[in-house]
Amino acid sequence: YEEHLYVASMEGLISCIDTRTGEQAWEERLESSSGRNEVWSSSTMTGDGLMYVSNQTGDTFVFRPNPRSYNQVSRNSINEHTNSSAIIGNGEVFIRTHKALWCFAEHASP
């Protein structure tokens, strides 16, 4: 995103890498709510500029890409084991766990 790559490692670290130089701009540990902190998913970006990455515990970290520092918007947990990347479309976020397929969306009040 804007000449920077945001990648999560299996050890639960997220890094920002400058694609022009190959240098790491920053690295941050994704703090798990409990259990396993390992990340097997890829980061996914939404049209409104937010990125999502999930760890094996079922925590999904939402952050705003920034080449200067990690800017976490939220951490949400579904407390189910997952290795999957979030799929995002039409205002909905889908996360596949070992037990279920979850869908999250913001709905307007009637």
Image (cartoon, rainbow, N blue to C red):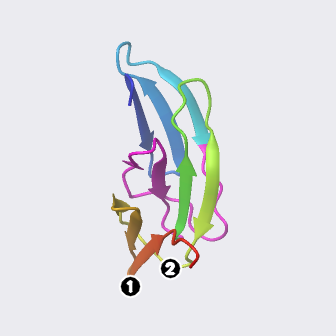
Q: Is residue 53 magenta?
A: yes
Write the residue at 38% across / 13% down: 21
Query: With 87 as the anchor, is 61 left or right in this view?
Result: right
- Which residue is identified by label 1? 100
Work out which residue is located at the far bottom of the displayed protein and give it. 99
Mark 2: few/some/many CA within 10 Å (<14, 14-19, 20+): some
Residue 25, placed above or below residue 75: above
Name the one closer to the observer, 22 or 20. Answer: 20
The boundaries of the magenta stretch are 29-57
Secondary structure under tag 1 reads: loop
- Sequence order check: which comes first, mark 2 or mark 1? 2
**Image-quadrant location for residue 100:** bottom left
- Which residue is identified by label 2? 80
Write the residue at 63% across / 49% down: 73
Residue 8 x, y percent position in the rendering: 45, 46
Are the residues flagged by discs 2 and 1 in contact, CB closer than 8 Å?
A: yes
Res. 73 mark: none
Q: Quadrant of the N terminus?
A: top left
